Image (cartoon, grey):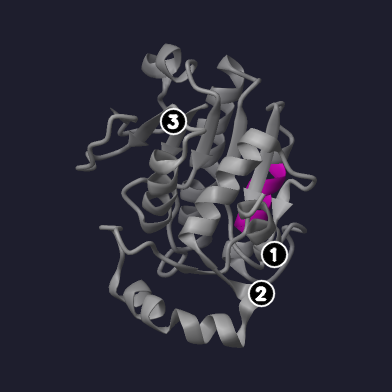
Amino acid sequence: MKVILTGATGMVGEGVLLECLENPAIEEVLMVNRRHFVKQHPKLKELIVPDFFNLNAHLEELKQYDTCFYCAGISSVGLDEQKYTHITYDTTMAFAIALVQIKPGMVFNFISGSHTDSSENGKVMWARVKGKTENALAKLPFKAQYNFRPGLMNPTSRQQNVKLLFKIISALYPVFKLLMPNNVITLKELGLAMINAAVKGYSKNILEVADIKVLAKT
């Protein structure tokens, strides 16, 4: 399997990338980044795309891949709904639509979030926008499309892109796991689940923490 991965310069994307590079089911990974990420591996290639709304020059290259792990994203903290929607919904959809037009046989995996609002009508802004994105992606004619809703995530020890908050969370992870096991997950589990969804499929297109843990062990 040949994978396109976005968001490698972020914590989630980097964690998923590390699992892809170690997994024998993955032949090649193409990081589609807005800026260069210093990472070398025999399986790894990088494509710099400053504007995800303009993929026209790269369509033939992207067509060579079987799966997209869309891990790019941003926190809603400090953003109004218009700005957050542009980054989370508009940008994701532009990327996904470009891919489905050139290769509808692709599997598209999207990193969403725990407590995402599928109704799109709730009071929490980020949850509405994520729900809108999930719903729109599910309508695209991909071979399969999965939305992953991880909760509190524990980064992999070898990661470079981990902010201080998540380093603290990592130190306290055993406590969180004991107190709220259904709300915490490791990035290793998330990466394995995304790979297994693409290779083997899953019965649901929205995967909560419990589903992710099950699929990671499949």
**Between 22 and 73, the one nearer to me in the picture:** 22
* Residue type marked 1: Ala
Task: Judge left or right: residue 207 versus residue 50.
Answer: right
- State the separation of the CA atoms marked 3 and 2: 36 Å
Nearest to N terminus: mark 3 or mark 2: 3
Q: Label 3, on which residue? A: 53
Q: Label 2, on which residue? A: 182
The image shows residue 64, relative to residue 150, as above or below, that is above
- State the separation of the CA atoms marked 3 and 1: 34 Å
Q: Is residue 48 visible?
A: no
Determine the residue positioned at 49% across, 47% down.
Answer: 86
Q: Is residue 16 magenta?
A: no
User: SS class of the residue under badge 1?
Assistant: helix
What range of the chain is rendered magenta? 129-136
Determine the residue positioned at 61% across, 53% down.
Answer: 216
Furthest toward the left, the residue is 38
Q: Label 1, on which residue? A: 210
Q: Position of residue 146 (x, y in %)?
A: 67, 43
Q: Position of residue 21 (x, y in %)?
A: 38, 40
Q: Is residue 216 visible?
A: yes
| The quadrant where residue 42 appears | top left
**Between 61 and 95, the one nearer to me in the picture:** 61
* Residue type marked 2: Asn
Nearest to N terminus: mark 2 or mark 1: 2
The image shows residue 59, relative to residue 128, as above or below, that is above
Few, some or many residues within 10 Å of mark 2 (<14, 14–19, 20+)? some
The image shows residue 20, relative to residue 74, as above or below, that is above
Few, some or many residues within 10 Å of mark 1 (<14, 14–19, 20+)? some
| The quadrant where residue 110 appears | top right
